[in-house]
Amino acid sequence: MLNFNWVKKHRGQGMVEYILIVVVIVGVVFVAYKTFAKKLKDKFIGITEVIEKND
């Protein structure tokens, strides 16, 4: 007979690991946004100005 007590005890561990991975990814995206937001905004403003001049 198989003993599934080990699986039941360690099932929550996998969920915590997935949550930690999601938290790390969200943190990296947040830091990248804070770092590059002004530069990207300036680039898009420049692009829209070029497009408006050509129309």
Image (cartoon, rainbow, N blue to C red):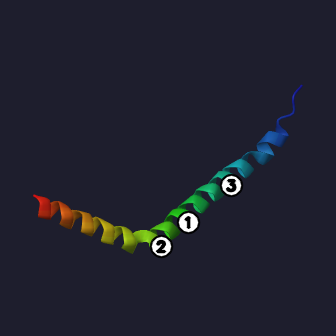
The residue sitting at 67% across, 50% down in the picture is: 15
Q: What amino acid type is highlighted by mark number 2?
A: Thr
Residue 45 screen position, x and y as percent:
25, 69
Mark 2 near mark 1, Cβ–Cβ under 8 Å?
A: no
Tally of numbered discs: 3
The residue sitting at 74% across, 51% down in the picture is: 13
Q: What amino acid type is highlighted by mark number 1?
A: Gly
Which residue extends farthest front?
54
In this view, 53 is above or below 11: below
Residue 27, disc: 1
Q: List the residue tagged with mark 3.
A: 16
Q: Which mark lies nearer to you, 3 or 1? A: 1
Q: List the residue tagged with mark 2.
A: 35
Q: Quadrant of residue 8?
A: top right
Q: Is residue 20 left or right of residue 55?
A: right
Residue 43 screen position, x and y as percent:
32, 67
